[in-house]
Amino acid sequence: MTRPRIVLASLTGLAVFGLLWEGLVRLFDVKPFILLAPSEIVAELGNAPARYTEAALVTARHAALGVIIALVVAVLLGAALAASRFAEQAAQPVLMIILVAPWVAYFSSIAIWLGAGDPPVVFLAAFVTTPAFVFAAVAGMRSADPAARELLASVDASRWEVLWRLRLPSALPAILAAARYTVGLALAAAYYGEGGNLSTAGLGAIGDRAAAAQFGPALWATVISTVVLGVVFLAVITIAERVLLHWHASQRDTALPRSVR
Amino acid sequence: MTAISLSGVTKRFGRIHALAPIDLTVDDGEVVTVLGPSGSGKTTLLRLVGGLEAPTSGTVTVLGGDAGRARAAKQIGFVPQAPALLPWRTVAQNARLLLDVNRRVPVRGGPSPDELLADVGLSDFAGAYPHELSGGMRQRVALVRAFALGAPLLLMDEPFAALDEITRADMRHLLARLCELSATSVLFVTHSIAESVFLSDRVAVLSLRPGQIVGAVDVALPRPRQPELEDDPAFFAVETRLRALLHEGAGR
Ligand SMILES: Nc1ncnc2c1ncn2[C@@H]1O[C@H](COP(=O)(O)OP(=O)(O)O)[C@@H](O)[C@H]1O
Ligand SMILES: [Mg+2]
């Protein structure tokens, strides 16, 4: 499909979704706290745009910082694990535990440990996104062309150089694919952490107060703001893929003629 | 001086006896080909010389020292069977990869990568990425990459095996020209008789299981080697002798 048609299709889908939502809420007279009509959410956002923009920027910072920290940890850890099957096997269950453990259960411990403010929020966002990045980094690094590995060995490249020149670029497609999923996870973690920690700003803090006060419009305004952040994050990753992976088959138009498809 | 000297070299992988005792020398500036069927241990032999594998017994001397030292000094230009170009590097960047890697070690440097690319007809593709090239073009980049290192020894592992017959012929003519220009020592392995005759000063024939040298033939054909040489009766004569040696090796 051509780009204008893709945009058109996406907008159509969103419009249909919004109309259905609005229609359902009006038709069945749903309670504002359960589900709010999109028009009312938009009105709430319009009432205090600065408040939501500022909060969204805080949440974006928490989530982005978490993802970046997770990325750095995962690349270093991934390089170590890619070098040793034993270490990889040893790390596997620990990473799985992190992946499946519910934040609700342990976030208060993190908050007590790291105190009030940003650190526990960023920590949570980084903590929950690390496993997916590690899995992607290890798989991607292992996929590095063995012939290229041998070529680098023939001029006695150091481990560091092999990582930098071969393993990391080879892992980039998998890492960026994982990032599509982890940015959503990081936003959810940031939102949750902001709501559950003392003296933090951000969408989660507003949402938490709105929920306590049973004030639907503010709660739903933070939900929509978080969704918008997610879309922006995905757009950033798509751009990063276009720039960093221009050499990769995933970024090429390899469509076969219709008759062969 | 001898570039490579193998004496009594064997290699086992568990129960597999890949190489029986091998004795082989490559003199300075000499182009030697090891000719053998698939599985006869050609890649193993190259890896031993390149210091990427240790022999089970025997000694490997490369450029007057052990193979690992030559490798650490970046004195070996390696051309693998697959071109192994890095897809995120342009042709020009791939051509200088071996110069860029491990810069702690000073290298003499050969002809500039750009000159070499022009020489093999790839100037217009210097900014292209590997996925935009044909198989023959990729392998030409791999040759340029090795020659640009300016190493005193080149090791080549059937670099043209994956190419079609017509491209292969062009590639061996190109390689012969590059070798004659550079005067480095070359150890080339292949299963193609025509390739071995056209390129080499000497051809050693390897038999199958265990890999063992059943005979060597001096190729006393004039240099520089021209493509027309392949129609010469003298060329056929060498090919015939090598074919006989291969049969002999297979018959044992
Ligand atoms: N790393 C290895 N582990 C086990 N066996 C190997 C290994 N490398 C090569 N071999 C065996 O050694 C023999 C020679 O292999 P190779 O050197 O690749 O031959 P060629 O390159 O002539 O086709 C084969 O039987 C192959 O299976
Ligand atoms: Mg081989």
Image: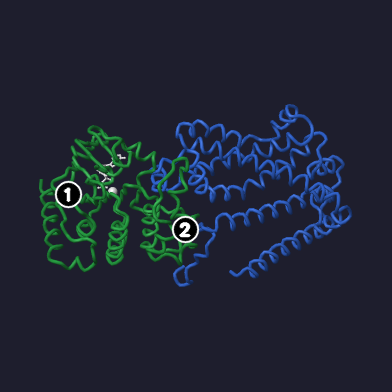
Chain colours: A blue, B green
For the residue pair A99 and A67, the one nearer the viewer reads as A67
**Image point 71% across, 38% down: which residue?**
A122
For the residue pair B164 and B170, the one nearer the viewer reads as B170
Query: What is the x, y in percent for residue A149?
Result: 42, 45
**Image point 52% across, 34% down: which residue?**
A92
Q: Quadrant of residue A185?
A: top right
- According to the image, label 1 marks what residue? B205
Q: Quadrant of residue B51?
A: top left
**Image point 19% across, 58% down: which residue?**
B197
Secondary structure of the residue carrying tag 1 is strand
For the residue pair A244 and A249, the one nearer the viewer reads as A244
Q: Chain of mark 2?
A: B
User: Residues under labels 2 and 1: Cα distance?
Assistant: 36 Å
2 and 1 marks on the same chain:
yes
Amino acid at pointer 1: Val
Query: What is the x, y in percent for residue B57?
Result: 23, 32
Quarter of the image with the C terminus of chain B is: top left
